[in-house]
Amino acid sequence: MPMRRYLLPVGLLAGLCCLPGPCLAGLTIYGRIYAELAAESQGEDATQTDTDTLDDAQGLGRIGLRFTQELEGGLSAFGRYEWGMDAAEGTGFTAREAYVGLNTPFGSLAAGRFSGLYKSTGGADFDPFYQTGLEARQHGGMASGPYGTSGYIARAVEYRMPEWQIGADTRLNAGVQYAYGEDTSTIADGTAGSVLAAATVAYKQLEVVAAYSQDGVSELANSKFGVRLREGNLTYFAQTENVELGGFDTAGVGTFLLGGVEYQHDKWRFALQAGNYSSEQDQADAAYFAVGAHYSLARNVHVTVGYRGTDSDIASLSSTAAVLGLRYDF
């Protein structure tokens, strides 16, 4: 990457460190550094290749700025700039989220580039191995791509309703994102006219989620429904997706099922999950599983270890991986 592409974000971060205290009152600088060792076998029989890697291929590393400022009339401004960082490769400042908005008594309204609501509702939030080599995304457990669990939406507006309290124990949250512009090409950040929407209902320790994404040009769509239950040290989840975009085959059309359980014990968090992809193509189904654990060396330092397997009717999509990762949050 040319050095000049680093100058703006590096200069911005350096300049922020020199601002007077009152200017920094509503600003948070945050980030995450992750490096992962993986031994992976890809494909089967004649197509099989074995590789050992040290990387952050799933994009867990990042650095960002988040701000809030109280205004008059019950309003507040908020915003974020976030870039991806790859510690293993020594590269970074790839665009993630960038937006600015207002909180009002009637909800929040923002404009910019957002992590897709389809991705962050269920999916990425449910998967304990998300953005590691053990994740369900891209391995037969959940939809990927810009309208799945890899999605961002740019040139967009986002509205999120204020949390609605229903009785003493029930809460409803919902939001919608819409991409503006004249561009009708299929791009990684969603085409003009794309719509993403999601809702979460929480009752005590139970969450029920639903999400929807639609491409603005083809009008093909994905939908998701899931549940998660926390009970003491145990967490259970399950979700299903009907996808027309981002399936685990060449056509990208089918149904995903994914379920898992987590157990928290002292500094350990153990997890087991399994999924299945049923393709509308003949001989294109897949099964996925992952087992592993996170160990907290400190509140912000974590080790990840585990094993993942994918068995696909399409031999080149079958794979196994043993993973060891180290993560530092700041």
Image: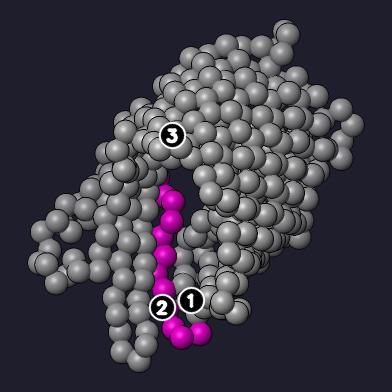
Q: Quadrant of residue 32?
A: top left
Q: Amino acid at mark 3?
A: Trp
Gap in Å between the C-alphas at discs 2 and 3? Answer: 39 Å
Which residue position is annotated with label 3? 268
Q: Residue furthest top?
A: 46
* x and y, in percent, of residue 269 in the image: 47, 36
Is the residue 44 above or below the residue 234 in the image?
Answer: above
* x and y, in percent, of residue 102 in the image: 41, 78
Q: Which residues are magenta?
A: 91-106
Q: Amino acid at mark 1?
A: Leu
**Secondary structure at numbered mark 2:** strand
Instruction: Looking at the image, tell me whether mark 2 or mark 3 is earlier in sequence order.
Output: 2
Instruction: Looking at the image, tell me whether mark 1 or mark 2 is earlier in sequence order.
Output: 2
Instruction: Looking at the image, tell me whether mark 3 or mark 1 is earlier in sequence order.
Output: 1
Q: Would residue 187 be visible to someone looking at this image?
A: no
Q: Residue at x 31, y 89 (%)?
A: 72
Q: Amino acid at mark 2?
A: Leu
Rate crowding at label 3 as few (under 14), some (14 to 19) or many (20 or more) other CA atoms within 10 Å.
some
Q: Residue at x 43, y 56 (%)?
A: 97
> Does the segment drawn in magenta span residue 326?
no
